[in-house]
Amino acid sequence: MNALAATSRNFKQAAKLLGLDSKLERSLLIPFREIKVECTIPKDDGTLASFVGFRVQHDNARGPMKGGIRYHPEVDPDEVNALAQLMTWKTAVANIPYGGAKGGIGCAPEQLSVSELERLTRVFTQKIHDLIGIHTDVPAPDMGTNPQTMAWILDEYSKFHGYSPAVVTGKPIDLGGSLGRDAATGRGVLFAIQALLEEYGKSISDQRFAIQGFGNVGSWAAQLISEAGGKVVAVSDVSGAVKNDNGLDIQKLLKHSLESRGVKGFSGGDALNQNSVLIEDCDVLIPAALGGVINRENANDIRAKFIIEAANHPTDPEADEILSKKGVIILPDIFANSGGVTVSYFEWVQNIQGFMWDEEKVNFELKNYMIRGFKDVKEMCKTHNCDLRMGAFTLGINRVARATVLRGWEA
């Protein structure tokens, strides 16, 4: 099931639990604006190349729209749509004053030189500069983009609107990026796990973890979990997978992964089939890579008691049903990985105030938001007698619906 179908299914289920009026339900689903632009750039060899850029702005009832920009060959409008919608509910669950957006350019970034990527980013910004803005829509990095991409967008946008550091988040520190942003999603995952385990009278130090994905989120989560005394027994990434029942040495694995561009061949553990990491014997499974990896094919084989969705949409709705019958507790993506967007909000706040925080304050505030968010989700679970995913969806959708009605927008 693709991301859009799954998101819509979760939305409909939550809307039913909330008893939303069908007109309101429909207006919440329709995106506020969809943008599609042609970006033509001269390549380094002098030939012209054209790319298609998208931006879907889903909802702005609770504040400016917020969401990543990805550079990927398969930037599919349907997927961008689903992810923009997901950002609307995610920012509402995190209780930060944003709506959802998502965008991207259909290109293969690894096949473009740095100067070609810069030209492409600047042309894209020229085409959408009057549709984004500090109080309109605030982009951020996503797959295939990074702080440098944000620096180019900021510079190009500022040519039209004056210096505006708050127009994008995930910037380099030197241009008004926030301390702690790099680790934010992984650190949020840590705080989410702590809150969930506490609920069951457990703590990180007595649990065994398996992590799929060792990019930004997976590697930070692994590092922070092992610092908190948790035992990471298996890790995988695109290169391969590695396991050690006594716990992997995460610092050494990080070093190895940087040097060999992946976890494959790490001497402090045994090689493992990449897909087996999901069904490895562990207490807590953290999918931190791609969507749709837990499906009806492998759901029955999963041995973890808790699944923390650090990736976007890693669990198919069909797998959801199988796992809940097995009694597996799933902490949904729209709460579990909201640390990134929460610290993006802190970055935006610091830029608007022109006053930067130290890292300690960033982490302290993030912890507060994550713990409060978990309590709010649990409240909705009690109210609607539902699992954590529906608790999070009903919480987010209810907040957006209330803002919509209060602003007088409902049909």
Image (tube, helix red, strand yellow):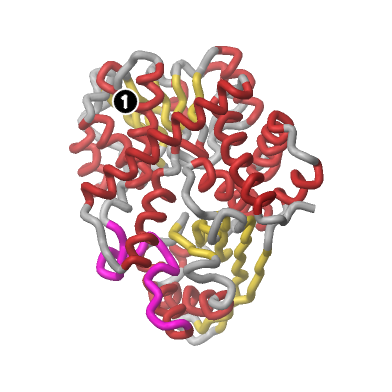
Q: Amino acid at mark 1?
A: Lys
Using the rendered image of the protein, determine whether residue 153 is visible from the camera's viewpoint.
yes
Magenta span includes 43: no
Q: Which x, y percent locates residue 208?
A: 32, 20
Q: Which x, y percent locates residue 256?
A: 23, 42
Residue 73, image quadrant:
bottom right
Decide if residue 128 is on the left or right side of residue 180: right
Residue 31, image quadrant:
bottom right
- What's the residue at 68%, 64% (across, down)? 33
| Image vertical order of residue 365 relative to residue 346, above or below | above
Magenta span includes 168: yes
- What's the residue at 66%, 56% (across, down)? 407
Decide if residue 326 is on the left or right side of residue 170: right
Q: Which x, y percent locates residue 283?
A: 38, 18
Decide if residue 345 is on the left or right side of residue 32: left
Q: Which residue is mark 1?
A: 243
Residue 337, image quadrant:
top left
Decide if residue 109 is on the left or right side of residue 217: right
| Image vertical order of residue 115 relative to residue 247, above or below | below
Nearest to the observer: residue 143 or residue 330: 330
Nearest to the observer: residue 66 or residue 144: 66
Nearest to the observer: residue 33 or residue 77: 33
Q: Magenta stretch?
A: 161-178
- What's the residue at 24%, 41% (across, down)? 254
Using the rendered image of the protein, determine whether residue 240 is visible from the camera's viewpoint.
no
- Identify the element where label 1 is drawn: strand
In the rendered image, which quarter contains the N terminus? top right
- What's the residue at 56%, 12% (across, down)? 326
Q: Callout 1 environment at 10 Å: few (<14), some (14 to 19), or many (20+)?
A: many
Name the dominant secondary structure of the magenta segment. loop
